[in-house]
């Protein structure tokens, strides 16, 4: 699996398996086993997904050595705060039966709460319990606020990003500040498969629309974590390293932007 070097020197796979909306249980365990059998090494979960126990089981049953995997989880809004975040981290590790995480993210930038939570992530990182720390759904102004008190800056910002929400300004800011961008809902939760531009590009390469979108991300140095529990889709989403989009095709995809979100606006969260 191809990796990128994050700002703190550690390597992260450019493609991982997202597990949002997959419940605890056999389906998730077998999706992780199938993905790792195919070559996936990165799994993206979160405390709020309520499936960390099965993620841990999938990891153990995969038989892949722990050090070869890259496991991400996220602290939920209700647990933002120095002590609360330390406790939430312990709970995530307990559920997954792991003794460290590769990446831990602040899930949403809840005003007035994320700077204290960040101090907890810094402490966990300094204690060697998380290899890399980052944020999710942070806009430029949240990152600027964090910068005022942070000792370590995030190495990842995981944001909603797909051809109808290309986030160019935020990506430019993150790139300038050595923060790698990771796309959530890269497939817009299935909302792009009938797009004629994407269908045409896909047909030209003999690939699927999903593969074209994920390839567009990779060529823009964006890390992707598409979600599926179906073996054929897990395989399809990995077959993106054997073709290349032209600059013109990338520009055509960029032009699909409509600043359209499928998830909440980080500046207007009420949960
Ligand atoms: P996604 O864009 O990955 O789309 C998933 C949907 O597309 C599913 O219905 C799946 O069955 C379908 N799909 C996947 N591959 C396909 C293929 N090749 N062909 C046809 N259909 C296919 O949406 P997502 O799950 O919202 O996002 C991916 C991951 O990002 C999540 O699982 C989660 O790990 C993460 N995420 C993070 C946040 C956050 O706030 N940080 C929010 C949402 C999601």
Image: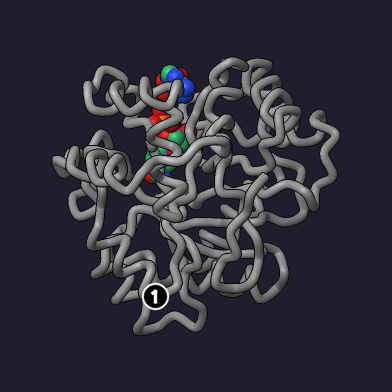
Residue at 55 percent across and 64 percent down: it is 133
Quarter of the figure with residue 17: top right
Q: Position of residue 3 (x, y in %)?
A: 62, 54
Q: Position of residue 190 (x, y in %)?
A: 34, 22
Given residues 67 and 89, the one toward you in this image is: 67
Q: Position of residue 183 (x, y in %)?
A: 40, 46
Q: Position of residue 168 (x, y in %)?
A: 25, 57
Residue farthest toward the left in the current orientation of the protein: 258
| Disc 1 C-beta below 8 A from ligand 1 | no
- The residue that mark 1 highlights is 177
| Residue 46 in view here | yes
In the figure, 143 relative to 88: above or below? Answer: below
Q: How is the image coloured?
A: one colour
Given residues 1 and 42, the one toward you in this image is: 1
Residue at 23 percent across and 27 percent down: it is 197
Residue at 42 percent across and 57 percent down: it is 181
Q: Is residue 233 left or right of residue 96?
A: left
In the figure, 214 relative to 159: above or below? Answer: above
Q: Is residue 255 left or right of residue 112?
A: left
Q: Residues within 10 Å of mark 1 (few under 14, many from 20)?
A: some
The quadrant the N terminus occupies is: top right
Given residues 152 and 221, the one toward you in this image is: 221
The quadrant the C terminus occupies is: top left
Q: Mark 1 falls on what kind of element?
A: loop
Residue at 58 percent across and 59 percent down: it is 4
Q: Quadrant of ligand 1?
A: top left
In the figure, 146 relative to 219: above or below? Answer: below
| Residue 48 in view here | no
Given residues 12 and 250, the one toward you in this image is: 250
Q: Please give the count of numbered marks on the rendered protein.
A: 1
């Amino acid at each position: 699996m191809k990796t990128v070097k994050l700002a703190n020197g550690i390597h992260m796979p450019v493609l991982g398996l997202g597990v949002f909306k997959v419940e605890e249980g056999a389906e998730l365990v077998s999706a992780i086993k199938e993905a790792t059998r195919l070559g996936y090494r990165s799994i993206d979960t979160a405390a709020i997904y309520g499936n960390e126990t099965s993620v841990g089981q999938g990891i153990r049953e995969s038989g892949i050595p722990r050090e070869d995997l890259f496991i991400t989880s996220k602290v939920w809004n209700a647990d933002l705060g120095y002590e609360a975040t330390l406790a939430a981290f312990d709970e995530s590790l307990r559920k997954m039966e792991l003794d460290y995480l590769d990446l831990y993210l602040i899930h949403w930038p809840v005003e007035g709460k994320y700077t204290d939570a960040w101090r907890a992530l810094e402490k966990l990182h300094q204690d060697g319990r998380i290899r890399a720390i980052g944020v999710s759904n942070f806009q430029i102004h949240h990152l600027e606020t964090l910068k005022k008190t942070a000792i370590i800056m995030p190495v990842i910002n995981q944001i909603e990003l797909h051809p109808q929400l290309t986030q160019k300004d935020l990506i430019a800011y993150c790139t300038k500040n050595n923060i790698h961008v990771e796309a959530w809902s890269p497939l817009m939760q299935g909302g792009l498969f009938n797009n004629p531009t994407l269908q045409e590009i896909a047909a030209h390469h003999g690939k699927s629309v999903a593969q074209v979108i994920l390839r567009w991300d990779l060529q823009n140095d964006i890390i992707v974590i598409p979600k599926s529990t179906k073996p054929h889709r897990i395989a399809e989403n990995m077959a993106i390293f054997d073709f290349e989009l032209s600059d013109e095709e990338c520009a055509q995809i960029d032009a699909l932007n409509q600043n359209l979100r499928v998830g909440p606006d980080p500046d207007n969260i009420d949960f």
